[in-house]
Image (tube, rainbow, N blue to C red):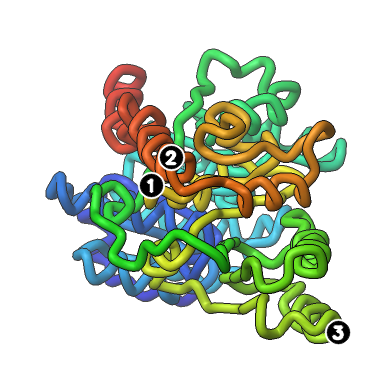
């Protein structure tokens, strides 16, 4: 096994955050936010472990002064060899707190931590769980082996409740941390309300995000309201080529744009008026919170954090059986400036409500202190 961390650094770290990769994605954004928080708190005994590879997120975390381990494992489930390699590395270290983020990390990290008798073994489920009966059986054992289970929202909790029903006392809901640049109340120098209105999606181009339906809806909007709006799809994923081809076939190349969202999401938000999240399901929906932090009203189904905090006509518009995505976009186009400015203020207040009582690291430290000290 190859890894890019020398032994002295391994021995020196007390807490490991383990994930599948440290490239780009929702989990990686969360880990960058954690590293920023640790840096502000001047915490030194923390390392970040990627089961596979390290890229953008790993480089940024390193720049903040934290060790990053890339193990270059297959890390598939149930690849016990990967779990054993991680176990050997843990056994050589003095790490006592192992915090795992996402399915692969939960599986391999908890098995390795359990076998190496680490005192603190924490799982974190960040997405709505839809697994087979056998997978649920396996993860019920993983949750039992853990000493604490974190879920990212009430929606995630509901999806895993039947799996962890015997471990509810050691399960907590803890919202993912927000990157520091999204917590500062900065004026939007790019703000210019008016037609054409700029809509934005940021995330993975995967089937669950319903991006094809989103593009088709925008096509209908532009037929009925020519030159009224544009849509930016920022991110990457397995459906990227199919979406590019769809936009070309519909003749929308001058209205639907693609961007790489790595490293510049803050600036992208500031160039847009509304954020759209049309996913079938969301574990948390961090991009929606980031959008609210910049004053962008959110158009979404009631899923993830939107289930609890999205209120129609207050901080966005709700897509449901009574109100289609087309109708929500139409309402955006018809919203007068004074109402939009009210939603802008309400959006920022939403983030304050979500995080007023929540500091991920502080609550995590309190849980560990209260349960294991």
User: Which residue lies at the image location 69% right of the left edge and 61% below the top edge?
Assistant: 76
Question: Which image quarter is the C terminus in?
Answer: top left
- Tell me the residue that label 3 is attached to: 249
Q: Secondary structure at mark 2?
A: helix
* Snapshot quadrant of residue 204: bottom right
Q: Earlier in the sequence, mark 1 or mark 2?
A: 1
Tell me if mark 1 has few (under 14), some (14-19) or many (20+) residues whose alpha carbon lies within 10 angstroms of its own: many
| Residue 161 place in picture, x, y as percent | 69, 22
Q: Are marks 1 and 2 in contact (CB under 8 Å)?
A: yes
**Above or below for 74 versus 83:** below
Where residue 198 sits: x, y (%)?
Answer: 55, 65
Q: Which residue is mark 1?
A: 293
Q: Which mark is residue 347?
A: 2
Q: What is the number of the mark on residue 199?
A: none
Q: Secondary structure at mark 3?
A: helix
Name the one closer to the observer, 276 or 175: 276
Residue drawn at point x = 37 percent, y = 28 percent: 353
């Amino acid at each position: 096994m190859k890894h890019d961390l020398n032994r002295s650094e391994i021995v020196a770290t007390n807490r490991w955050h383990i994930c599948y990769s440290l490239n780009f994605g929702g989990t990686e954004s969360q880990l960058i936010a954690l590293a920023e928080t640790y840096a502000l708190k001047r915490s030194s005994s923390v390392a970040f472990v990627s089961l596979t590879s390290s890229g953008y997120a790993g480089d940024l975390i390193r720049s903040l002064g934290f060790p990053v381990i890339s193990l270059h494992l297959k890390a598939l489930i149930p690849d016990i060899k990967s779990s054993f390699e991680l176990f050997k590395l843990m056994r050589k270290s003095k790490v006592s707190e192992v915090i795992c983020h996402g399915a692969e990390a939960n599986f391999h990290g908890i098995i390795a931590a359990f076998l190496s008798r680490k005192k603190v073994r924490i799982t974190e489920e960040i997405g709505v769980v839809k697994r087979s009966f056998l997978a649920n059986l396996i993860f019920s054992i993983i949750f039992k082996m853990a000493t604490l289970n974190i879920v990212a929202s009430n929606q995630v909790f509901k999806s895993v409740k039947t799996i962890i029903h015997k471990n509810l006392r050691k399960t907590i809901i803890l919202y993912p941390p927000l990157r520091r640049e999204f917590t500062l109340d900065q004026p939007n120098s790019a703000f210019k309300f008016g037609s054409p209105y700029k809509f934005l999606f940021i995330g993975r181009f995967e089937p669950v995000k319903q991006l094809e339906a989103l593009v088709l809806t925008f096509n209908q909007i532009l037929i009925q309201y020519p030159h009224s709006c544009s849509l930016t799809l920022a991110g990457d994923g397995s459906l990227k080529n199919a979406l590019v081809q769809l936009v070309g076939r519909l003749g929308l190349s001058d209205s639907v744009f693609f961007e790489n969202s790595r490293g510049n999401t803050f600036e992208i938000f500031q160039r847009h008026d509304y954020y759209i999240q049309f996913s079938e399901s969301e574990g948390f929906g961090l991009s929606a919170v980031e959008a609210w932090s910049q004053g962008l009203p959110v158009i979404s189904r009631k899923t993830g954090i939107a289930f609890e905090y999205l209120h129609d006509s207050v901080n966005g518009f709700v897509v449901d059986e009574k109100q289609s995505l087309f109708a929500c976009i139409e309402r955006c186009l018809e919203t007068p400036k004074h109402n939009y400015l009210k939603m802008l203020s309400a959006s920022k207040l939403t983030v304050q409500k979500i995080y007023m009582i929540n500091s991920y690291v502080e609550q995590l430290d309190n849980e560990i202190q209260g349960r294991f000290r």
